[in-house]
Image (cartoon, rainbow, N blue to C red):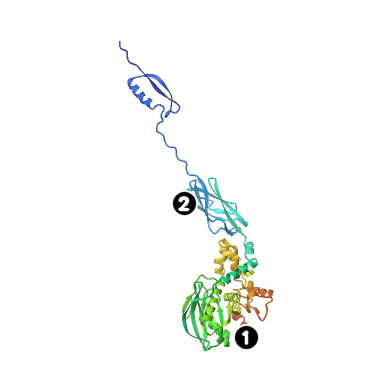
Amino acid sequence: MMKTARFSTYEMIPGPDARHDYSFCRLRLLSPVALLLSLAVLVSCGREGPTTPEPADPPRAARISVVSGDGQRALAGSSLREPIVVQVLDEEERPMSGAHVLFAPGHGFTEPTTAGTGPDGKAATNWTLGPVSGLQTLVVSVSGVTVNVSGHAVSVEDSLDVLFAPPEEAELSAIRADWATRDVSPAGGTVEIEEPFSMGGSPTTLRIVSHQVAGVRHFGAIVVPRGAGTERLPILVFAHGGDDGVSVESTLLILTIALGEMRDDFIYVIPSYRDEPLEYGGRAWTSEGPASPWDRDVDDTMALVSLAMDTIPEASTDGYIVVGVSRGGGVAMLMGIRDARVAGVITFFGPTDFQNDWARDITSLLVRGVTVDLPGVEYMRANYVVPWWAGDITLQDARLALIRRSAVFFVEDMPPLQVHHGDMDGVVSVTQAESMIRAMEEIGRGAPEFEAFIYPGGTHEITSMPAAIPRALAFLRRILGPK
């Protein structure tokens, strides 16, 4: 009797991990078909099957970079001018999008307090400083990574104390050295117009001329009395006020009325200022360059005088006189200080001291955002006061800008000077004349080389000071001498 064949094989018994591991194999009798299946299983015994990749770890913030807004200055309790902008970077220094940024100020508050980063990894907030002056800190954080941003909360009065501290000798020396290096020689002189002109019935020749000063083209008028012959006439410069340019006809009318019988005794030089028009006969010529009240005004006018002396045979080269009104009064005094050829200066309500309390009060308003509509003030606000306040220029630059426009600090170089000012002047405070009076007294200067007249009830108009013109004419005659 035949016996049925029996085969011995092993059956794999799953271990704890049924997918990949078998802890042992057990002997068992199987049929031929089961045997084949078992052999297939044996082939894979002890080998891993297919696996699913583990998910990659998400990028993590490694660093926060401050893009802009750090170190700004603002009035304590007010907002910084520019937002605080940061950028979040991962471990590969790549910008992280969607990171949650927290802005936590030590003083004041931010808006917003949290922000998500954009595709460029950047987030921003606006920071209003706390009410206490001094250095303040804003902590910016993302997932445990932090960076500090600083803001300087300033007190107006404390800051102005520093800005308006008395000038030091080193500052005065630096300004004089700067003046000495400036090239104020005229170049490329051109006559734009030449034609006859009547000054109160006296015939003259009027020229509109142009020239270059350090590459900047400047325009002015030169008026020469006819019949002067070989006699050399002194130059009289009229420095105008305001910020809107100068009319040649109006200026000559004023001089004709004021000088009377002396109108034929001078060659007249009428400068424009940078970025302002010179108007005559329905036409206008605008001088080039950015405006620079009281400072580069002097450069351009000195060059125009040199052009007149070089090209007008009737012009005396022994010296000249400057008459200035309002802004032009400040220009006239600075010309007297800077140009040794000036024989005398007459000013009507001109600024003398950009470091006194009146100038400080105007600056205090400007840093608080108040508009002050006075000649030259907008220029000073935009170029020096606000940039200094915001930290865009140094304290030293702002101080030098004020000091170099203040004739009171350089009075030892002043030629004979006559000052006229009304005590009710609502444009240029009478304290400007008072500053000049004190400065002259300190160096022992008095009549006849220095005269100052304060007119009770006088305003910012020459007509409000009835005795001013006769006094000015007497001063001119003393300067000119018996001739």
Q: Nearer the viewer, mark 2 or mark 1?
A: 1
| Position of 453 relative to 94 (above/below) | below
**In the structure shown, which secondary structural element does the residue marked by tag 1 occupy?**
loop
Q: In this view of the protein, can residue 434 be seen by the observer?
A: yes
x and y percentages locating residue 426 in the rendered image: 60, 74
Q: Mark 1 belongs to which amino acid?
A: Gly
Alpha carbon of mark 2 to alpha carbon of mark 1: how far?
Answer: 77 Å
x and y percentages locating residue 12 in the rendered image: 40, 24
Residue identifier under label 1: 481
Quadrant showing the C terminus: bottom right
x and y percentages locating residue 424 in the rendered image: 63, 76
Specify few, some or many for label 2: CA neighbours under 10 Å numbering under 14, 14-19, or 20 or more.
some
Q: Mark 2 belongs to which amino acid?
A: Asp
Rendered residue at 55%/66% (across/down): 383
Rendering quarter of residue 301:
bottom right
Residue identifier under label 2: 120
x and y percentages locating residue 91 in the rendered image: 49, 45
Farthest top residue in view: 1
Which is more toward the observer, 280 or 174?
A: 174
Residue 76 numbered tag: none
Rendering quarter of residue 332:
bottom right
| Position of 109 relative to 482 (above/below) | above
| Position of 266 relative to 71 (above/below) | below
Label 1 near label 2: C-beta < 8 Å?
Answer: no
Classify residue 225 as left or right of residue 455: left
